[in-house]
Amino acid sequence: MSSSAPRHELLGRRDECETLDRLLAGARAGESQVMVLRGEAGVGKSALVDYLVANATECQTLRAAGVESEMELAFAGLHQLCLPLMGQIDRLPGPQRDALAVAFGLSAGSAPDRFLVGLAVLSLLAEAAEEQPLVCVVDDAQWLDQVSAQTLAFVARRLLAERVALVFAVRVPTPGPGADRFRGLRELVVRGLRDDDARALLDAVVPGRLDVRVRDRIVAETRGNPLALLELPRGLTVAELAGGFGWPDARPLASQIEQSFVRRIGALPGAAQRLLLAAAAEPVGDVLLLRRVAERLGIGTDAATAAEAAGLIEFGTLARFRHPLVRSAAYRAADPGERQDVHRALAEATDPESDPDRRAWHRAHAAVEPDEAVAGELERSADRAQARGGVAAAAAFLKRATELTPDPARRGARAVAAAQATFEAGAPDAALDLLVAAELCPLDELQHGRLARLRTQIVFARRRGGEAVPLLLDAADRLERVDEGQAREAYLEAIGSAVFAGRLGERGALRKVAEAARAAPPGPRPPRPADALLDGLATRFAEGYVEGAPLLKRALRAFRKEAGNNGDDVMRWLWLTWLVAGDMWDDEAWHELTTHAVRTARETGALNFLPLSLTYRAAVHVHAGEFDAAATLVEESTAILKVTGNAYLGYASMLLLIMRGEDAQAWTVLDARAEWASSSWGEGRSIGGRHYMNAVLYNSLGQYEAALASAEGACEHEDLGVYGFSLVELVEAATRSDAPESAATALRQIEERATASGTNWALGLLARSRALLSGGQSAEPLYREAIEHLQRSRCTVDLARAHLVYGEWLRRENRRVDAREHLRIAHEMLQRFGAKAFAERAGRELLATGETVRKRTADSPDRLTAQEGQIARLARAGLSNSEIAAQLFLSPRTVEYHLGKVFTKLAITSRHQLPQALPDQDQNRP
């Protein structure tokens, strides 16, 4: 970071300075501002940051800088930025305060979710900005540690109505992993100076008069890079300048500038060079620590004077290099032995009580051969990092501990642990490399089993095809001999892998896995819900739906009971229990499990899990006809995924698109997403899902032959959570396409499944399907039975469709008056849901009875957005702004901003009027 005095006017930067002026004005006015300054090294990002800070009058400023050597220290960059505000930590809500205290090592506790830490930082900044506008700048953000970069990117995307400006300076091309976290934020690309400004700057720094042609060549070679213009001519003779820096240099400009700094450092006395090396290796800039190091290395006070006189560093309250390239030049120019000596001195001078992790890291860099004492210290640092939620830091500590472990057996164990942490930190390739290293060491049976299971988890995370199935079976077999609980979990993961592989997996893979799982040891006592789930799925795929149903119902009951005791277990296996509940048509289990999952994820700040739970909960809302609520959750899930960088979850959004009947858009999106899931992820189950959704869409449009073809395509493979729904669509399509045999075959399977399930949803769909295949007056009691069952379920879309097909049947029986009653109910319900195509189908039938169909009025231009609606519903339920903010990962001020817009659109003045202005839209009964 540049430490020179900030200037209020920058040569050739009028446009950039005006942009920053507007940014400051917006923050002062209560409109949060976020900006990423991108540009090559030396182009002037730090100068613009200095300009911003210098002009942030009447604002509080916070500064931090990423340092390459600190990239493995969890929350290092975040702690540096927030340190001046830590006196306000007690103002935060309890969970946020505790999470931030644990993350910064101020207190002990379980590892906080890093996004709960992000919410705490958001609240901390918002709280500080209430007193005075706040300007936060992070220079060299590409070097931030991973969790700090992710947390600050989260904060940047959640700011809206706070008096906060958050600015990141990022070098391009991006050398560090942190910079990608800021993609998608507002950017200001900082380019080189225009030629006339570059010539003026060069004339100002080069003594004597340059030949015009030489000057133009220098400007062209530097591409207007200010630091290059200032640094590259230094130390060159008139003769060298005459040739335009001597021989042309093909190296990147940053390398040329760094080499210029290397030359300048090399011209200093040896003691000054060693002091610069120590400052480069010490990322905080602690001047007192550097003095202790200088004493240990025999460096006198004149070394600091020489380094400052050369314009390379300043020693004030903190040690500040003139530019980050000076730091890298000082470190890289030293030979390995000099670096080890400096790190050893830094370790000795660092307090082991107050900063044990930096001390361990310096000891590791000083080590020249395996050293168990240092490896053990790194392992303890990894434990501390893990406890603070710094998985990436823990992975780095464990990897270095592995390298320094002399005993082969202990080295293997640490390599497996390092691989696990590395995988959890989002680096699967590096994790696989560590597993290869672990396999070269003597491992016991448990470690072999853990290694095999981790390898398959990595394979499954990369591609949800069947490749992981045999690997998981091998891992489960190994684990059976040493840990029955882990072995059963591996079998459950193997079944899940085979389920997702679907028709793209090996033929008979599910049955093979199920048979192997049935032979597994019984597991721990008392059995866990996961054990009941494994037994149910193993029986389901080995013997059949009917045989597995009692066990799966028992498993779902166990998970619902567990939801009140152990949220982690429910969250961990939701990806399977949700599919099972859908396959069993168990809408109550769907409702309870997803409600619990969303609530728990919000309360614990588990943003890695929250998008999945929001997606599953949104799908429940779609089946309940609560399309607006579903859209709100889909929007929230998508916004969080942009922050976390995880893969997009498209099921609920596609289902919503289909149910709304937006046919052209739906087909395009559906085919594209299904193709991506099957080709990129190997997820054959998505093919069945695409056919099912096409069948729904075609049935809604009254294109029954196409619906039949799609439903038959879906039923070519028995996909968990898809097949039963597809059978229901097939019956409706086949009865309207003169394909009674296909309908009868599908009905027999529905009868088996629905009877085994026994839920009102299942029995309602069964009665509706029977009615469609029945002739004469035998159909009417079945239609009424379907309506009665579905009225007792949560699935009001299917209830509306039951009224629709009943009304259609009544019209064909020439009972127009009776038909109108049910078609009117169906039409009104489907319109209220927003199921456009199904509503139009009901409308056409109503017109055929002679009824006048009222068209739905166009949406008001002042209709609430999805997020406004969500905030309004929570406020209607009695939650305070702070409570709403905590649930939605916003600041209270942003909630207040949205509520202001809600009040304006609804023409009300207080939240007490919300119940009347915003009726409960979740009640979708006729």
Image (cartoon, rainbow, N blue to C red):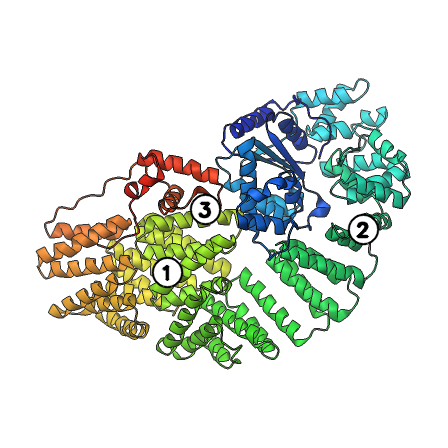
Q: Quadrant of residue 4?
A: top right
- Residue bearing mark 3: 883
Looking at the image, can residue 653 be seen?
Answer: yes
**In the image, 741: left or right of 356?**
left
Q: Residues within 10 Å of mark 2 (few under 14, many from 20)?
A: many
Q: Residue at x 82, y 38 (%)?
A: 262
Judged from this view, the residue extending furthest toward the front is 90
Residue 907 on image: x %, y %:
31, 34
Numbered mark located on residue 347 in the image:
2
> Which label was assigned to residue 227?
none
Nearest the eye: 73 or 542: 73
Left or right side of 228 for 714: left
Are the two marked residues, 1 and 2, in contact with CB atoms closer than 8 angstroms? Answer: no
Position of 516 relative to 209 (above/below) = below
Crowding near the residue tagged with mark 3, few <14, some 14–19, many ≥20 C-alpha atoms within 10 Å: some
Camera-side residue: 750 or 296? 296
Residue shown at 90% from the left, 36% from the top: 269
